[in-house]
Image (cartoon, grey):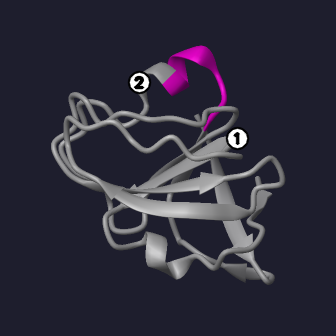
Amino acid sequence: MNKINLFQEDRLIFHGPIYLADSFFSKLKGLMFKKTLNTEEGILFKNVNKIHTCFMHFSIDVIYLNKDYEVIYVETVAPWKIGSSVKGAKHVLELNKGLGNRLKKEKIVIRF
C-alpha cells in the first residue's frame, strides 16, 4: 500500500503513516488482524462507503468523506461492529480512536 499525507488548509493533519487502500486486496484486508495502530496511523479507503470492524481488536474513528474528500461524518466504531450508512459518503478514513476530532468538516487534500 502507498503511504500518503493528508492536509487541511495546507496543514499536515497526521504524521502517519497513513496508507491508501485502492486495490481489491488492500481494501479486503484493511486493518483486520492488527493488534494495535501507531499513534497517528490510519488507512484511507477510496471508493468505499461502508466499513466493518470484524477481526479487529480495538475501536477506531471512522471519517466518512464525500466525492470531493470533504468530511461529512465522524464516528467511533468498536470491534465486531458495522459502521453507519452515511448518505453521500464515497471514501472512508480509519484512524485510532480519538483522532477524528482533529478533522474539520471541510476538504482533505491527499499528497503522495
Front-most of 102 and 80? 80
Residue 103 in the image: state x and y as whole percent: 58, 76
CA gap between label 1 and label 2 equals 19 Å
Return the residue found at the far top.
24
Mark 2 lies on a secondary structure that is helix
Q: Is residue 81 left or right of residue 88?
A: left
Q: Residue at x 80, y 47 (%)?
A: 67
Residue occupying the point 23% across, 31% down: 33
| Residue at the disc numbered 1 | 90
- Disc 2 crowd, CA 10 A, few/some/many (<14, 14-19, 20+): few
Amino acid at the residue labelled 2? Lys
Residue 28, x across and y down, in percent: 46, 20
Q: How many marks?
A: 2
**Residue 49 place in picture, x, y as percent:** 59, 37
Where is residue 30, by image quadrant?
top left
23 is within the stretch colored magenta: yes
Magenta stretch in the rendered image: 21-27
Q: Amino acid at mark 1?
A: Lys
Q: Is residue 86 left or right of residue 55?
A: right
Mark 1 in CB contact with mark 2 (< 8 angstroms): no
Question: For this rendering, which residue is in front, 3 or 8?
Answer: 8
Residue at (32% x, 60% y) in the render: 38
Residue 29 - label: 2
Query: Is disc 1 surrounded by few (<14), some (14 to 19) or many (20+) residues within 10 Å?
Result: some
**Of callouts 1 and 2, which one flags the residue occurring earlier in the amino acid sequence?**
2
* Helix, strand or loop under label 1: loop
In the rendering, at what x and y percent does residue 83 appear? 39, 42
Q: What residue lies at 71% left-to-right and 46% top-to-bottom?
A: 88
Could you tell whether 23 is left or right of 52 in the image?
Answer: right
Could you say which quadrant of the image residue 96 lies in? bottom left
